[in-house]
Image: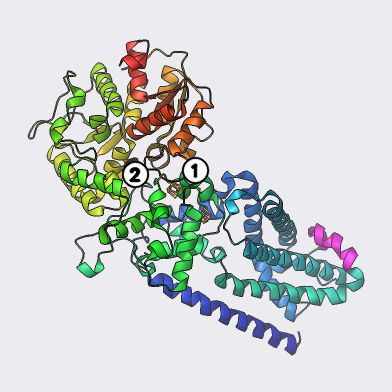
Amino acid sequence: MTLASFIALWLAVAIALELFSRRALRLYRLVRSGKPVARFDDVPARARAEATDVLGQRKLLQRLVPGLVHAAIFWGFIVLFPTILIAMIGAVNPHGTLPRLGAQGWYALLVDVFALAVLIGVGAAFVIRKLVRPARFQGSHLGEADLILGLIAGIVLTLFLWHSSQIALGLNDYPAAWAPISNALSRVVAPVAPVTERVAVWAHVLIILSFLVYLPYSKHLHILVAAINVYFGRTRARGRLEPINFEAPETEVRFGSGRASDMTWKQMLDTMSCTECGRCQDVCPAYYTGKALSPKLLIMAMRDNLFSGSTAPIVPNAVTDDIVWDCVTCGACVRECPVNIEHIDHIVDLRRHLVMVESRFPEEAGTMLRDVDRTSNPWGRPQSDRMQWADGLGVRVLQPGEEPPDVLFWVGCAPAFDERARKAAVSTAKLMQQAGVDFAVLGPRESCTGDPARRMGDEYTFQRLANENVATLNGAKVKKIVTTCPHCFNTIGNEYPDFGGRYQVVHHSEFLAELVRDGRLQPAASERTITYHDSCYLARHNDVRAQPRELVAAVGKAVEMPRNRERTFCCGAGGARMWMEEKRGRPINQERVREAAATGAETLAVACPFCTVMLDDGVRETGAKLQVFDLATLLHEAVAGRQTAEEL
Ligand code: SF4
Ligand code: SF4
């Protein structure tokens, strides 16, 4: 050990730590300045997410090649981590190493193998970026990513050079045979080993320290904070939005995000965690159809705005109005994001501010909000019309004070007021009657659940409707609810518990599949080919994917679209987009209909009244040779043994 090298090392480490911690402290203070959000509960679920999504690289490995590339680099760095300390000891004292670990043959083998894996990973990442050039990288900071990859390659190459020089000089504490790659290289470097041993170890240490300093100042901050962001991710239902507490003191009520300082600390952390990988952008129906919204660019814009210290309104200074209103809240981005960024919460918070503070929203959506306010449904129809769909069916309307039925059939506004969506409610009611289910409906006492108002950002209206509906349901002592609408299903099941409404909520596809399984409904399967469109609020937000397929198999021959189950593609109606004009890009519903038609199926089955309307429109607009039916209608046809579902 020389005093000079000891001083040089500690000087380099001290400078690096000072620069690193100065920036890290600033970022920490910034996150601490964010508005509160409860994310310290549910430790076991958070630990599980850390194990699967960070250590296991679960989401990244959904795309095999880029996933393996990332996993090789990530796992490699975990294994190589102790070599940082070993190299620092070696820089000061060529004969020194970390006690125990530094002398282990098995660790030398692991280091050799994983260093090679990192090198291959870096090479593959360069090939993907420079030659394959996936569209998802459009708009990402590719220059910085290249520099990071270069630094990683430098770390591994200097490690190999140092180890092989050590072996050539006999300075290795572990048996050389355990490190086959370094051992083989040692013969090549042997003539210059006295020089390369010193140069490599110092270069190795200095690149690592430069890397440490560069990260918090770069756009690739995610390397430091992504694991923390995953830990603080959502553990509650994916389809649930965080309610605003209007009862809080006036100064503490947060009306969404107007300025960067309105964001929660988790949202700030989200922006710092973005890897700019573009996986969210790749699956976003808005981006895919040429709209202004890219979830990746939105998060990057929110980060740049946060870091700029701007006190100007986020919309339109950092994010345009179009971007905010393009989102269908389908959740594809959230599901895909490897670092669990919660895009929908960001977008809904921007909407909340625009709607509740600035009263700014697309004109057509304003009509919907006024109708909901005036008539308690987005169709603007009187509540007294709510039972028209059931004319002649003999459906029991639950009156105040009556004994509750086994099942409360929550009809929903679309089936009650829209001709095309009505068939699903009629079929479900008839099937329940045939199966002898004791059920009733609320009739005019049922109001909109508030889902469209909430997704549009009007939390006031949502909470008014939620409180009214919960009071009605609790007053009626309802225990089990069946609904044909995935939006009602999500809102009542996942969001009403925040307002004191706790029920067993079942989607009609689950309920009907159970009746078929129990033999209470006996459909006759036909030769009809059916492709099933998964609703985002059913398949992705709520994991109901198997039961609809059971029904399809019970009535016909299934053929899947490429984008299916949790990776379904939206119909275009979610997030209150049902009530907004699609002014930009290609229509989302037509895109989905073309995908369905390409399967060659005769029937496009759905399990959502919004999907029914949107995809039926899409079929008319594209001229596709498809018929759109709700699963309940198809099942009723199969049970009744009729020729076509159109007669029902
Ligand atoms: S929720 Fe859907 S539409 Fe909205 S940003 Fe994410 S992927 Fe795009
Ligand atoms: S938000 Fe997530 S999926 Fe999208 S680019 Fe950033 S890290 Fe990737």
Q: In the figure, 75 relative to 377: above or below?
A: below
Residue 91 in picture, x, y percent from top left? 74, 78
Q: Is residue 495 visible?
A: no
Dot placed on the residue nearer the N-terminal end, 1 or 2 = 1
Kind of residue at disc 1:
Thr
Q: Is residue 640 left or right of residue 110?
A: left
Q: Quadrant of the C terminus?
A: top left
Q: Is residue 359 visible?
A: yes
Q: Which secondary structure lies at badge 2? A: loop
Q: Residue at x 55, y 59 (%)?
A: 275
**Residue under pointer 2:** 580
For the residues marked 1 and 2, what is the alpha-carbon distance in whole angstroms? 16 Å
Residue 53 in picture, x, y percent from top left? 52, 52
Residue 387 in picture, x, y percent from top left? 17, 28
Q: Quadrant of the N terminus?
A: bottom right
Q: Residue 469 or 590: which is nearer the viewer? A: 590
Kind of residue at disc 2:
Met
Q: Residue 484 or 94: which is nearer the viewer? A: 484
Q: What residue occupies the far bottom of the structure in this picture?
A: 3
Task: Check if mark 1's residue and mark 2's residue have beta carbons within 8 Å.
Answer: no
- Residue range (magenta): 176-189
Q: Is residue 142 left or right of residue 440?
A: right
Q: Determine the image quadrant of residue 323.
A: bottom left
- Ligand 1 closer than 8 Å to the CB at disc 2? no
Q: Is residue 344 left or right of residue 430?
A: right
Residue 246 in picture, x, y percent from top left? 21, 60
Q: Which secondary structure lies at badge 1? A: loop
**Residue under pointer 1:** 289
